[in-house]
Image (tube, grey):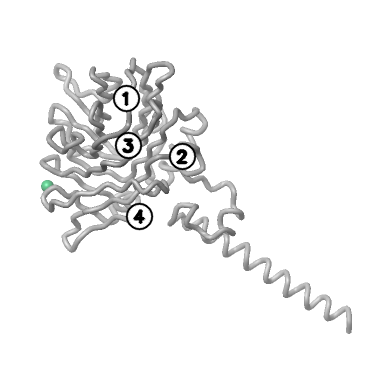
């Protein structure tokens, strides 16, 4: 009789343990929230699930599937930062708001900008670092305008495209246009690594190196704009954007690949 009680108790314990494990994995596999907002068991149970917050230096993280504020016409007034720094981007003028489009890329939503007047602003994001790594998942509609900027500070810009002769090049403007590679208008994971120690910008598209160019250090601060110049006054981006991740550090090759794999899996973009 005593042995039966023991085995009954053991069975209950095993059942309880099994339900804790499967609940924890369920949280991780859903991948609906960044890890800091998940339950503690979820984070500890499955270590192999990567999140951008796992790498030091994350200063901005915008995802079109989280914390996007839009009205009945899908016009976006706020895109909330997931890095934990509260660096939300906003737009209060209806005509300048991007449009939220559900189920646009691998079942996930995107923000669509018209290239006419749309942009979003942030006046508080700053960093003492001169090293940065940018990841932007986007698809330009067209590369017809002379200059197209995705992320702009007052002294520099992440170019999607600018015209050199008859060619459209992607790179950076740091006081000088640094054309790293030909621009393309497909869905892509584009990476800019701004290395202040070596004074170089390195770029990758879908995990493949695009090469490098000299780079003069830029400071992150002041008015910052996405989808246009920092003040929205020009060089606007017509196209779709799914996710923007920025570190104020130079990522190692292994860490860059972790982020690329994470984005590739989320959006079904082959790297
Ligand atoms: Ca507009």
Q: Position of residue 28 (x, y in %)?
A: 52, 56
Query: Residue at 44% across / 30% down in the picture?
Result: 249
Q: Position of residue 130 (x, y in %)?
A: 38, 26
**How far apart are the alpha carbons under marks 2 and 3?**
13 Å
For marks 1 and 2, give the one nearer the viewer. Answer: 1
- Mark 4 or mark 2: which comes first in sequence? 4
Looking at the rendered structure, the secondary structure element under dot 3 is: strand
For marks 4 and 2, give the one nearer the viewer. Answer: 4
Q: Position of residue 155 (x, y in %)?
A: 24, 26
- Mark 2 or mark 3: which comes first in sequence? 3
Q: Is residue 264 left or right of residue 98?
A: right
- The vertical placement of 271 against 100, above or below, is above
- The vertical placement of 177 against 119, above or below, is above
Q: Which residue is mark 1?
A: 218
Q: Which mark is residue 66?
A: 4
How many other residues sit within 10 Å of disc 2, few (<14), some (14-19) or many (≥20)?
some
- Mark 1 or mark 3: which comes first in sequence? 3
Q: Which residue is mark 3?
A: 188
Contact between marks 1 and 3 (CB within 8 A): the answer is no
Quadrant position of the C terminus in the picture: top left
Q: Is residue 63 left or right of residue 35?
A: left
Contact between marks 3 and 4 (CB within 8 A): the answer is no
How many other residues sit within 10 Å of disc 4, few (<14), some (14-19) or many (≥20)?
some
Q: Which mark is residue 261?
A: 2
């Amino acid at each position: 009789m005593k042995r039966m009680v023991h085995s009954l108790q053991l069975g209950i314990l095993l059942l309880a343990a099994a339900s804790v494990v499967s609940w924890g994995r369920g949280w991780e596999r859903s991948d609906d929230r960044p890890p800091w907002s998940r339950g503690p068991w979820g984070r500890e149970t499955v270590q192999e699930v990567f999140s951008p917050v796992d790498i030091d230096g994350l200063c901005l993280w915008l995802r079109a599937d989280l914390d996007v504020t839009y009205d009945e016409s899908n016009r976006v007034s706020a895109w909330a930062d997931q890095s934990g720094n509260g660096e939300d981007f906003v737009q209060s003028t209806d005509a300048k708001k991007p449009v939220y489009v559900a189920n646009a890329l691998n079942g996930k939503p995107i923000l669509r900008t018209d290239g006419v007047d749309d942009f979003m602003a942030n006046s508080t994001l700053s960093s003492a670092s001169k090293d940065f790594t940018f990841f932007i998942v986007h698809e330009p509609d067209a590369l017809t305008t002379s200059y197209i900027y995705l992320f702009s500070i007052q002294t520099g810009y992440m170019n999607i495209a600018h015209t050199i002769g008859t060619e459209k090049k992607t790179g950076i403007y740091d006081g000088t246009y640094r054309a790293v590679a030909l621009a393309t208008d497909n869905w892509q994971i584009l990476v800019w690594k701004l290395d202040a120690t070596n004074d170089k910008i390195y770029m990758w598209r879908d995990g493949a190196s695009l090469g490098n160019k000299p780079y003069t250090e830029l400071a992150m601060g002041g008015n910052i704009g996405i989808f246009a110049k920092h003040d929205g006054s020009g060089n606007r981006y017509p196209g779709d954007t799914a996710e923007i991740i920025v570190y104020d550090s130079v990522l190692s090759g292994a860490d860059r690949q972790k982020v690329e794999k994470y984005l590739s899996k989320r959006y079904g973009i082959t790297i």
